[in-house]
């Protein structure tokens, strides 16, 4: 297997929250869990910051929306948890003329809202890419049947998601790219990853329970299907998060829910990969380059 992290250092030194960070961000080990639902196409389209962004069509006036959670175990931004509302979409027209000229629409996932448990994850994500992040608490739990993720803020539940462990389909990675808005510009970021994904179609034992929070209300307005179209998870993934590319200027803001300054809590039971002991993680073996 090729070294995903080769030639990523030295990188670019940036400062957010008064602290230096080196980009691209490197993720030496993480785990991700997602449920992908159909949703009301018009409601989801209304979230998009540009008329050139289009949701992916599904049957009967529907589209796709993912609720995803990430246990970032060892990264150059530290160990933290994250939950996101993810909208698969494309940017550009799928016209015959464009196709003949070799111009295909860009694909990716609009990150409509993200909850993270640490200040570095929030500050760098917002400052460098414009991801709409706020601080919250994320608990990862595991039992015999499922991985369970509970997300909240200051004692208020946002959601509780259960992703079944029975997922027989392997491989077939989806393109990993995002859309975000930074300083009025639409940014397209293509990430590089490796790891094995497991999927299940129409997982009946999957569940998503919403709490009483502004982000819960946002999800509720999207009219998610009772059963997800599929579930997926990675138990051991590696990723490089590089700088994005501006693909459109003068788009609408995508600030999302802002939240407060209270640090979040990232809690894990024994069913999840644990952060490395201080001084033993791979991220700590790659010192910040001078710059």
Image (tube, grey):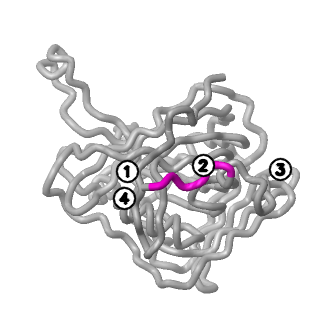
Q: Which residues are magenta?
A: 285-290
Q: Are marks 1 and 3 in contact (CB under 8 Å)?
A: no
Say which label, 4 or 3, has the lower sequence index: 4
Q: Is residue 245 left or right of residue 71?
A: left
Residue that sits furthest to the top in the current view: 100
Mark 4 vs mark 2: in front: 4
Point 83% across, 50% down: residue: 145
Q: Secondary structure at mark 3?
A: loop
Residue at 62%, 66% in the rendered image: 209
Specify the principal SS of the magenta part.
Answer: loop
What kind of element bears circle 4? helix
Among the two numbered marks 4 and 2 on one chain, the one whose residue lies closer to the N terminus: 2
| Distance from Cα at disc 1 to Cα at disc 3 | 30 Å
| Residue beneath disc 2 | 34
Q: Secondary structure at mark 1?
A: strand
Q: Which mark is residue 145?
A: 3
Q: Quadrant of the N terminus?
A: top right
Q: Position of residue 125 (x, y in %)?
A: 43, 61
Residue at 51%, 79% in the rendered image: 213
Front of the two marks 4 and 3: 4
Relative to residue 228, is residue 53 drawn left or right?
A: left
Q: CA distance from mark 4 to mark 2?
A: 25 Å
- Tell me whether circle 1 and circle 2 mark residues in contact (CB < 8 Å): no
Q: Which residue is mark 1?
A: 110
Which residue in the structure is indicated by mark 4? 128
Mark 1 vs mark 2, CA separation in Å: 15 Å
Q: CA distance from mark 2 to mark 3?
A: 15 Å
Disc 2 residue crowd, few under 14, some 14–19, many 20+, Cα 10 Å: many
Closest to the camera, between mark 1 and mark 4, is 4
User: Magenta span has 287?
Assistant: yes
């Amino acid at each position: 297997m090729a070294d995903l992290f080769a030639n990523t250092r030295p990188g670019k030194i940036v400062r957010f929250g008064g602290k230096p960070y080196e980009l691209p961000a490197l993720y030496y080990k993480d785990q991700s869990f997602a449920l992908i639902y159909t949703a009301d196409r018009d409601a989801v389209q209304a979230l998009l910051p540009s008329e050139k962004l289009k949701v992916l069509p599904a049957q009967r006036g529907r589209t796709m929306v993912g609720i995803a959670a990430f246990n970032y175990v060892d990264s150059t931004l530290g160990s933290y948890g994250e939950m996101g509302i993810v909208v698969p979409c494309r940017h550009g027209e799928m016209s015959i003329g464009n196709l003949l000229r070799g111009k295909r629409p860009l694909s990716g996932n609009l990150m409509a809202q993200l909850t993270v448990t640490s200040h570095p994850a929030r500050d760098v994500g917002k400052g460098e890419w414009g991801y709409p992040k706020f601080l919250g608490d994320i608990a990862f739990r595991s039992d015999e049947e499922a991985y369970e993720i509970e997300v909240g803020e200051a004692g208020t539940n946002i959601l509780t998601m259960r992703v079944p462990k029975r997922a027989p389909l392997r491989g077939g990675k989806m393109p990993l790219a995002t859309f975000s808005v930074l300083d009025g510009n639409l940014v397209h970021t293509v990430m590089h990853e490796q790891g094995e994904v497991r999927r299940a179609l129409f997982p009946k034992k999957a569940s998503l329970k919403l709490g009483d929070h502004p982000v819960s209300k946002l999800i509720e307005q999207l009219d998610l299907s009772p059963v997800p179209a599929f579930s997926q998870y990675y138990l051991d993934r590696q990723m490089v998060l590089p700088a994005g590319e501006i693909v459109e200027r003068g788009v609408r803001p995508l600030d999302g829910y802002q939240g407060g300054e209270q640090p979040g809590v990232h809690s894990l039971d024994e069913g999840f990969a644990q952060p490395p002991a201080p001084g033993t993680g791979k991220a700590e073996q790659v010192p910040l380059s001078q710059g």
